[in-house]
Image (cartoon, helix red, strand yellow):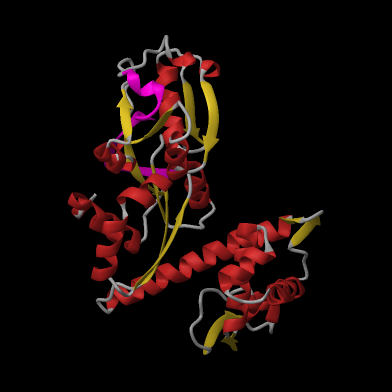
């Protein structure tokens, strides 16, 4: 019976609390009269923290990174995971050389733990709403362009308006953000690519435009435009596959019947800043959000080269799992939309 009760523990418990559960006796086989029996247990912090440790290891597939994120020692991380394995009588990770992988049991626990923390956070927020408080934890993931060049002023304003909200923010390319949303590692995503999943609700947030740029000290800067016929002869530096910027550019070319295999991609890089730095040393074009290069365009270090035959306009989009979004997610979306003059 203790194992069954323990499986109900969840959330970031801030204090030890005595809880009473009313259980129908016929359900648990305590007697034949069907009377009710009261069971008491302490919902302590330890199992909550062990689940938090486990989720960090499962997310990064690294005991070392989990230890760094939680500011505890690696042996402590290993001990907490071992205690969970003992508690549930299962093995949570397999080792393959220097790598660790989730077992089938580990994957089940990981998904369940994410759902548990999500339920706890939503419950905490709803209860605080009854007290006219905006409180809780909001986990947001956003594309690199959004995180670096667009959202910071609004985030600052949001924190000033709602200081009680604990905001957790991760950034990555659009593919990774959608993946984190589907695995319930985040509550809300902001992406810059196209719609992909029927399980996700997409809401247009902000118009944007991609531009081709070249460093003004390079020979390519002598031209003003590039036609699709000329494009295969032009060296390109692009974001990695999975990024929304890369996807929009390739989609625009496909719509015109252009064979992507003809592109002369000399390098793929994982961030806009690294691409801008690389352009200083190479005669090539790069595709980026206009918002990401505004400073360089004003200073004259970069120049826009037009693609007259294709449109590279797009939207940044909020995304969340289909269904009713949490009150905190709705509140954040409303706040951002009401402050679009800051974007």
Point out the residue furthest to the right here: 97
Percent across and percent down for residue 88 are: 73, 71
Q: Is residue 341 left or right of residue 210?
A: left
Percent across and percent down for residue 123 are: 41, 71
Q: Is residue 63 magenta?
A: no
The residue lying toward the viewer, choosing from 53 and 309, is 309
Residue name at image x 79 percent, y 57 percent: 95
Residue name at image x 62 percent, y 66 percent: 66
The residue lying toward the viewer, choosing from 193 and 222, is 222
Residue name at image x 55 percent, y 27 percent: 266
Residue 106 at least partly seen: yes
The residue lying toward the viewer, choosing from 296 and 86, is 296
Percent across and percent down for residue 325 are: 37, 56
Main SS type for the magenta part? strand
Percent across and percent down for residue 37 are: 60, 87
Q: Quadrant of residue 100?
A: bottom right
Point out the residue furthest to the top here: 229
Instruction: Reply above or below: 248 against 229.
Output: below
Q: Quadrant of the N terminus?
A: bottom right
Instruction: Reply above or below: 307 against 2.
Output: above
Question: Which residues make up the magenta segment?
Answer: 198-223
Q: Is residue 127 left or right of residue 7?
A: left
Residue 1 at least partly seen: no
Residue name at image x 53 percent, y 15 percent: 262
Q: Is residue 220 magenta?
A: yes
């Amino acid at each position: 019976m203790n194992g069954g009760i323990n499986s109900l523990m969840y959330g970031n418990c801030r204090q030890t609390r005595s809880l009473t559960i009313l259980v129908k006796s016929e359900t648990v086989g305590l007697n034949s009269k069907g009377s009710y029996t009261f069971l008491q247990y302490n919902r302590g912090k330890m199992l909550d923290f062990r689940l938090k440790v486990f989720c960090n290891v499962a997310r990064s597939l690294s005991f070392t990174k989990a230890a760094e994120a939680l500011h505890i020692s690696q042996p402590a991380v290993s001990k907490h995971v071992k205690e969970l394995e003992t508690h549930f009588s299962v093995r949570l990770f397999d080792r393959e050389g220097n790598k660790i992988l989730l077992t089938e049991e580990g994957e089940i626990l990981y998904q369940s733990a994410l759902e548990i923390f999500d339920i706890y956070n939503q419950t905490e927020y709803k209860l605080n709403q009854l007290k006219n408080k905006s409180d809780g934890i909001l986990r947001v993931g956003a594309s690199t362009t959004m995180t670096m060049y667009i959202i910071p002023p609004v985030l600052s304003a949001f924190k000033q308006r709602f200081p009680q909200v604990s905001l957790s923010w991760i950034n990555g390319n659009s593919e990774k953000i959608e993946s984190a949303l589907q695995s319930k590692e985040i509550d809300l995503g902001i992406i810059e690519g196209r719609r992909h999943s029927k399980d996700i609700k997409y809401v247009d947030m902000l118009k944007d435009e991609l531009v081709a740029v070249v460093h003004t000290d390079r020979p390519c800067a002598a031209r003003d435009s590039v036609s699709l016929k000329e494009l295969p002869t032009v060296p390109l530096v692009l974001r990695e596959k999975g990024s929304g910027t890369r996807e929009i550019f390739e989609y625009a070319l496909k719509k015109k019947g252009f064979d992507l295999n003809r592109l002369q991609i000399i390098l793929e890089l994982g961030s806009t800043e690294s691409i801008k730095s690389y352009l200083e040393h190479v005669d090539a074009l790069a595709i980026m959000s206009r918002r990401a290069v505004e400073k360089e365009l004003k200073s004259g270090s970069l120049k826009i080269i037009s693609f007259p035959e294709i449109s590279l306009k797009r939207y940044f989009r909020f995304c969340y799992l289909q269904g009713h979004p949490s009150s905190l997610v709705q509140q954040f979306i409303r706040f951002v939309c009401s402050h679009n003059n800051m974007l």
